Image: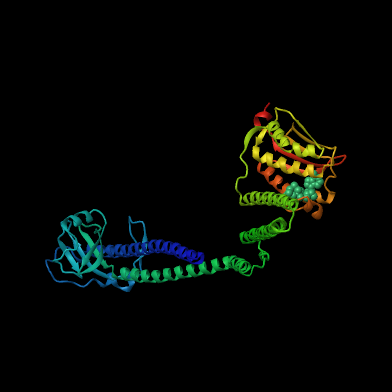
Amino acid sequence: MPIKLRLAILFSLVTAIIVTVGSVLFLHQVSSGLQSSLTAGLRTKGYILGQNISGGSQSGPTGSSSTQDVPSNLNGPDTNSVEVPLPGLPFSVAAPNSLVTAAQILNSNGTVLESFGVPASAPLLGASQSNSAASHELIIRKYLYKKLTLLLAEPVPGSSGQVAVIGASLKNIDSSVERLKVELVLFGALMVLIAGLVAWALTGAALAPVSKMRRQVEEIFELGQWSSLEVPKTKDEVAHLAKTLSELLRRLEESISRQRGFVAVAGHELRTPLAILKGELELAQKSDRTESELRFAVAEALDETERIIRLSEHLLLLARKDEGAAIVTLEMKEMAPILARSIDDFSKVATERDVSLMLNCNESVICGMDESALRQIMANLLGNSLRYSPSGTVIQITCEYQPSSVVLVVKDQGPGFPIDFIPLAFERFSRADEHRDRAYGGSGLGLAIVKSLVEALNGKISASNGTSRGAQITMKFPIPDFIKDH
Ligand SMILES: Nc1ncnc2c1ncn2[C@@H]1O[C@H](COP(=O)(O)OP(=O)(O)OP(=O)(O)O)[C@@H](O)[C@H]1O
Ligand SMILES: [Mg+2]
């Protein structure tokens, strides 16, 4: 369900609850206000009736069952508007324009002495009610001729236990309350509708920039044309979202174009050795080739195959790293034996090239390491150094504790890196001298892989040239905590 609709419904519901609770309280307030007002009016009229009786107009039971009219001074316009202070009662009110429908003077035992508006044979109060009304005011609701009537009974002043009962129909109040109820329902419905519409409009306005952004992003993906999102000038959450989304798109674009470039270059790099391999195999297949030509072709084909395998392994490792897969498993290892084994792997080639490999690493150097990753790092670095080292030179491998890290350095005495190439040395497929390095069989992935592995081992790597000459690769790995504590 759209947010706009959800918020509109929520606002309408909350408004409905508030309006309902408010209306119920208001209706209760109005209804009880009207009833108190009516009660006060009745009290006034009861008082007048009592005064009439105690003034001697009536003193005994009529015994008549005839119905007298309600006296005009109980319903006449003069009494309706007169304020009558009632002794002992906490208010002084104008009687409302209510119609007194019944009045009776009763004895404390319930005998009707005088009756107005109702037959004398039908007492408005029962015996026990009359008895209690003889001592204090009594208010009751009762149906009189199917009409709900409010009866107020109070002792007649100066009499011996006589009770004046006066009743007024609640019809007017009930119909007023009913009318008010209908009006409140209509008002409530209108408020609910307005709240829903306002919420709908406000949410729509607030979300408009978000919808615009969504359309822009959809367009970018549909057309494949990268462009940055329009960031609203407001410095609010939507503007922050637009900035974040723009940054995300920028990185996505970078990553996709890097990936495309990677695939394109990888394809190109694979094509060269495959083409050479094909050429060698064609040569080997020729009917007029000599045996030495055959041997040469097979040896070259083997070389190229090895190159293809190495390149594929490198590409696979980088792809796994890009996917976020774990490419190392860290364990506490002594560095010296692993480095010694790596050097052993190259000792034959080094001897052939008259290059010395010198290891300087204390047996005690321990570090969180992955043996095969370190062997791969050393293979790539020694392979490079041996390639560029003139005969009679030394390749130095040192590994030692420094204050905050275990530092591993591979340094040769070759020509070193061209200065402007140093910042690019760890980039994929980067070679200082395209033709020369390709002729060596390099694909420009070795140092990129070394960097990925060093970073996976929580280390840092840098390339530089030694003070005299030669290339130098420095790697720093975190020192284990238990060594730090010593
Ligand atoms: N010890 C070194 N001395 C001088 N130049 C170096 C040295 N090591 C690397 N380079 C330069 O850095 C480039 C990148 O090296 P890298 O190991 O990444 O690729 P590669 O050796 O050309 O190919 P690959 O290692 O993928 O087979 C090399 O092509 C070379 O130009
Ligand atoms: Mg290399």
Looking at this view, is 422 or 99 the one in front?
422
- x and y, in percent, of residue 81 in the image: 36, 70
Looking at this view, is 190 or 447 the one in front?
447
Query: Which of the 4 image quadrants contains residue 259?
Result: bottom right
Q: Is residue 425 visible?
A: no
Looking at this view, is 370 or 71 the one in front?
370
- Quadrant in which the C terminus appears: top right
Query: Which of the 4 image quadrants contains residue 237?
Result: bottom right
- x and y, in percent, of residue 18 in the image: 43, 62
- x and y, in percent, of residue 4 in the image: 51, 66
- x and y, in percent, of residue 410 in the image: 77, 38
Query: Which residue reaches farthest right?
Result: 468
Lateral position of residue 38 relative to residue 460, left or right: left
Lateral position of residue 31 relative to residue 216, left or right: left
What residue is shown at x 29% (from left), y 64% (from top)? 42
Query: Which residue reaches farthest top?
Result: 486
What residue is shown at x 49% (from left), y 70% (from top)? 197
Q: Is residue 260 visible?
A: yes
Looking at this view, is 18 or 148 the one in front?
18
What is the total number of numbered labels drawn onto the structure image? 0
474 to 254, vertically: above or below: above
For the rendered model, the colour scheme is rainbow
